[in-house]
Each structure stands twice: as C-alpha cells, then as structure tokens.
Amino acid sequence: MTEAEEPKPQSDEARSAFRQPSGIAASIDGESSTTSEFEIPQGFAVPRHAGTESETTSEFSLPDGLEVPQTPPADTEGSAFTMPSTHSAWTAPTAFTPASGFPAVSLTDVPWQDRMRAMLRMPVAERPAPEPSQKHDDETGPAVPRVLDLTLRIGELLLAGGEGAEDVEAAMFAVCRSYGLDRCEPNVTFTLLSISYQPSLVEDPVTASRTVRRRGTDYTRLAAVFHLVDDLSDPDTNISLEEAYRRLAEIRRNRHPYPTWVLTVASGLLAGGASLLVGGGLTVFFAAMFGSMLGDRLAWLCAGRGLPEFYQFAVAAMPPAAMGVVLTVTHVDVKASAVITGGLFALLPGRALVAGVQDGLTGFYITAAARLLEVMYFFVSIVAGVLVVLYFGVQLGAELNPDAKLGTGDEPFVQIFASMLLSLAFAILLQQERATVLAVTLNGGIAWCVYGAMNYAGDISPVASTAAAAGLVGLFGQLMSRYRFASALPYTTAAIGPLLPGSATYFGLLGIAQGEVDSGLLSLSNAVALAMAIAIGVNLGGEISRLFLKVPGAASAAGRRAAKRTRGF
C-alpha cells in the first residue's frame, strides 16, 4: 500500500483516549490494563486474622473467594519498597503520637519561675503553645530584635546581681514567651548571655548575645527586675514593649537604697557581731568593728584606683588581722583570735559560693566552674592578706594560740543576738529592700538556733549541723520567694552569714603562718567542707520546698524533669 493509499480517520471520534495504541498488544485475559492506586500490588498477600474483619465491606475490598495470586520473589535481595517479612499492618506498633496522646501538662496557678523552669526542661516539641499576645500595638506583633534585646538586658541585670544561671534562663524565657515568641532558646554562661529565636521550621533563626562586663550586688534592683518579669508573665496585665523598656530604664537609674557610709558601718557591725558569735567581749566587738571599717575604706580606695578585686580583698583583710596582732602584742586580756575571725566573716564570699554550687547542681557546669574559680581567687586573696599580717605578728612575738576554742556555746542568748545582728548587717551590705531586712534577720537567728542545738547541745558534727541549718534557710527562702513572687536570694544569702566558716579559716591560716602546715591544711579543709555544706544545704532546702508546691506536670507521666544536661533519673 502506498503512502497516498494509507487510510485516514473519518472523524475526530475515531481517535479515543482509551484506544489501544498501535504496536501494543491487547491484554489476553480481557481485563482492563488500567490500574488503581488502591489496587493491591501483585505478589502481596493480605493476611486474614480472626476478629479483625468488619461486617461492612468497602468498595476497595476483595470479593469473597478471590485470592490475590502470590508469586515468589525474583531474588533474595531486599528492596527499599519490599515489606519486611516480620511486619504486619494489623499488628504494627504505634508510631508518632500514641493512641492515648501525650500527657497534658498543667501550667496554671503556679509561680512563673516554676512554669518557665518546667518548660525549659521540656523538649521544644512538647512545650505548650502560648496564648495570643496582646502586648503590642499593631496586629503584626512586636519586633523580634527589640524583644530579644529587652530579654538580654533583663538577663544581664539578673546575672550581674548574682542570680543563678537556671533562674536567669527562666526569666529570659518568660519575657520572650510573654510577647508570643515561644520557639526561643536562652543560653547563660558566666559572662555571656545569648538567645536564639526561630519563627518557623523554614525561616532563618534570629540570634542575639550580650556580655556582662561588671557585676555588682544590689538586691533591691534584683527584686525590681523580678517584679517586672512577674508583671510581663501575668496574662491579665497588658504591658507594651515601650512600657517595659521605660520600667527597665527606671530600674537602671535608681540609686542604691543605702549610702556609702551606711555600708561602711554595716561592715563594722558585721565583724563585731561575728566576734561576739565566736565568744568575744565588748572590747573585741569594737576592735573588730574598727578593723573591718578601716579595711572597707581601704578597699574602696583601691577600687577607685582601678585595682582588681583580688587586691581589694587582700587589702581589706589586713586591718582586722592587724588589730588582733596589736591586742596580742600589747598584752590586752581579750580574745584576739575573735577579732581576726570577725573580720574574716565580713570578707568570705558566701554569696558567690552558693550561686556556684547551685549552678553545678542544676547542670550549668561551665558557669559553676567559673563561679567557683572566682571564689577560689577571692579566698586566696584573703589568705594572702591575713598571712602577711600574721607572719609579721609572729616575728614581733605575738602569741597567737591555734588551739584556742572559740564559740563554745556557753552564752546562747548572746550568740543568738550576735547572729541576728550579723544577718542584719549582711542584708544592708547586699542592698536589700527594707521590707525584707526583718525577715532575713529572723531567718539568720533561727538558722543559728538550729546549728547551736545540733552542734553544742546534741554533739553532732559541725558539717552536718551546718548543712541542716542551711537547708532550713533555703526552705524558708524559697517559700518566701513564692509568697512574694520574688527572688529567693534576698531571703537566703544574708541568713547564711552566721554559718560561714570564719574560725576554721582563721585557724588554718594561723597554723600555716606558725609553720604547722599539716594542722593548717586540715583546718582549711574543714572550712571548705563547711562551705560546701552551706551551699548544698541551701540548694537542697529549695528543692525540698518545691516538693510541697504545685509543680507543673507533677501529676502527669512526664513528671518534673531533672535539670537539663543530666540523665534525669
């Protein structure tokens, strides 16, 4: 047949979409060659289990009596699309969300510290979504960089004020969440704060950081920052971003509640109260007070000259030690050791020690190591200042007895009064609010009563007695902080002042100065054990207090997770 004689279709209807193309053989079994996406692939058998079939049939189910032909596999090598031999669709394990769902976590009717801490310890996928934020002026939401900047500025004030790393992260997370930024991750180290926010899984994250250059103790400012975070976390309040910036600027501009001369007198009263606590008399009280005030003024002079804190502590430790040496050389019938011990009480860095141990127990090991290293430097500077004075005192013939017993508990009422005076002076030095001074003073007196009853009356070891008294201080501080929605530091730091190991530190230094290195190191190791007992006791008291509080998720299967970066048993 020629090309001109080739038949052509008479109309468009002659071509059909279902017409078999030329060159393709038709199916020999008469069935349509088109398949459905619901058709069971050839070679796959559907197991039939008793009790799993439904009474109603589906249009995609196989008719009764019709079996799917089975063909052996062409080879034994598996494929990515081959169903595992042990897999059954009817007995498949649960995947992704379980049938019962994830346990709900209640985050209502608890302080914001516990809410934020619980969410920080959750995986990001399990955190409950925040409510729509109304703390901005327009419908587009707040500017993410400004929210992150406000968060970093608040975290800087808290970290510079001595707050623990976990509490700083909780406050930063609370500020971001109050403005609707839930997918944020704060990170706190000793001198650096950073925060990252990712709007969605397909958008680039926004990261900001801030460095803490200077640290100062002002618990009044710390309490004001906590009040600001509490107001931001309250869903009933509507604080815009501009209002939050204005309040933060006012907190920064506020002056300290106590002038410089009051702080100097407070340091003297602290040393005098500590000297009474270890058995000194009225003469010892005034001698320790005068030496500590002189050391405080010399430290201020060194600070004005720009000397580092290491030298400031060394200079501040010299005048009290010199007063004790002078009383011994002049043969004044007083306990000169009590004068030196009282001066050491005013210098021991109890606040930094408690914060460092707390960071270590909650999983912030880098920050804890940095804080404890700072404590070690301060301690070495105090040791250097006192040893220089004691060495020259021994050369001048000062008879200082390292075996003298201080604070035998013979005058309990005087020691209770001295412990309360010490806590009061310590609270003033920490620039606390006037409303918290009375509470922390009573807390310090109760702590010393517990220590005296266990150590002097019960003949229990000083380490165990110190840990129990510090645990009571931590318990009371956490309960008061939850009651007032504030930080626990103003209620705990000054109250542990009477428990600081001033006498053990002094006798260790005296033994080293007189050449008795073994006894000196033994006494210093006892001082370190007492300091660790204080820090661990305060933290344990705070953890015990949370057992009696409403903790988010305590009734669920998840429970209260342990500190992050730990195994969480």
Image (cartoon, rainbow, N blue to C red):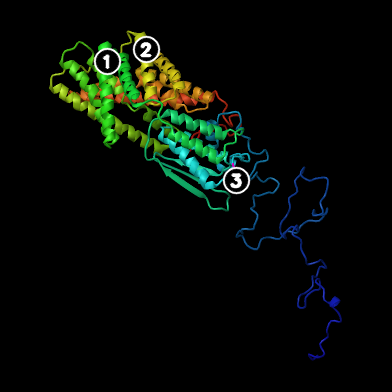
How dense is the environment of label 3, judged by Cα within 10 Å: few (below 14), some, or many (20 and up)? some
Name the residue furthest left.
396
Across and down, in percent, residue 114 comes to 54, 31
Question: Which of disc 1 and disc 2 is earlier in sequence?
Answer: 1
Residue 71 screen position, x and y as percent: 71, 60
Q: At label 3, which amino acid type do we have?
A: Gly
Residue with the mark numbered 2:
417
Q: Are marks 3 and 2 in contact (CB under 8 Å)?
A: no
137 is within the stretch colored magenta: yes
Q: Does the magenta stretch include residue 361?
A: no
Which residue, given by chain and number where applicable, does mark 3 sit on? 141
Above or below: residue 448 compared with residue 351: above
Query: Mark 2, mark 1: which one is toward the viewer?
Result: 1
Q: Could you tell me how many numbered marks the image carries?
A: 3
Three-letter residue code for mark 1: Phe
Mark 2 surroundings within 10 Å by alpha-carbon count, few (fewer than 14), some (14 through 19), many (20 or more): some
Q: Mark 2 belongs to which amino acid?
A: Phe
In the rendered image, which quarter is residue 472 located in?
top left
In front: mark 3 or mark 2?
3
Q: What kind of element bears circle 1?
A: helix
Q: Which residues make up the magenta segment?
A: 136-140
The residue tagged with tag 3: helix, strand or loop? loop
Circle 1 packing at 10 Å, graded few (<14), some (14-19), many (20+), is: some
- Marks 2/1 in contact by CB < 8 Å: the verdict is no
